[in-house]
Image: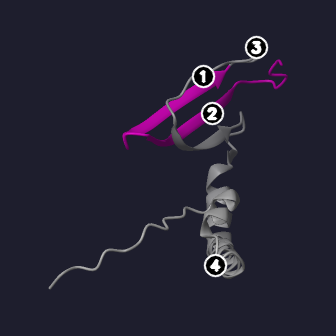
Amino acid sequence: MCNKLVDKITFRILGKNEEGDEVKKELVIQKDGKECLYVLPKGIYTYEVVLPNKDIYKKGEQFYRQRDVDLPQIKSIVQNSAAVLKSIYAKNPKVLGDYGLVVDDTPKVKNPK
């Protein structure tokens, strides 16, 4: 893919790697530049695309904001689903593992006083 714009495109990549270290990178694709590959350590990143007219597009931030809005409802749905499955499979809780739930059905030991 070629950069068919009149000028360069700049990608600013910001985030943290798995160790929690801050990572800041800038990738510039020049006019008529070819595809680029930029290897980043595993982590969570946001990015900005800076166009020649200095317009900046921030994609990562909008997705994180939407995730934060949706997450409580999703968490509630998962918790309610787990409760329903627990009631259905009360006699055989190991089946819950088939649904991705962690099952610890070892007998609880009473603490002697």
Q: Are marks 1 and 2 in contact (CB under 8 Å)?
A: yes
Q: Position of residue 26 (x, y in %)?
A: 54, 29
Disc 1 target residue: 38
Q: Secondary structure at mark 2?
A: strand
Q: How is the image coloured?
A: one colour
Q: Nearer the viewer, residue 28 or 24?
A: 24
Identity, as a three-letter code, of the amino acid under mark 2: Phe
| Mark 4–mark 3 distance (CA, rounded to whole Å) | 59 Å
Disc 2 target residue: 11
The stretch of residues the image draws in magenta is 1-29
Q: Secondary structure at mark 1?
A: loop
| Mark 4–mark 2 distance (CA, rounded to whole Å) | 52 Å
Q: Secondary structure at mark 3?
A: loop
Q: Which label's residue is closer to the chain start, 1 or 2? A: 2
Front label number (3 vs 1): 1
| Mark 1–mark 4 distance (CA, rounded to whole Å) | 50 Å
Where residue 16 is drawn, which disc sits there?
A: none
Disc 3 target residue: 34
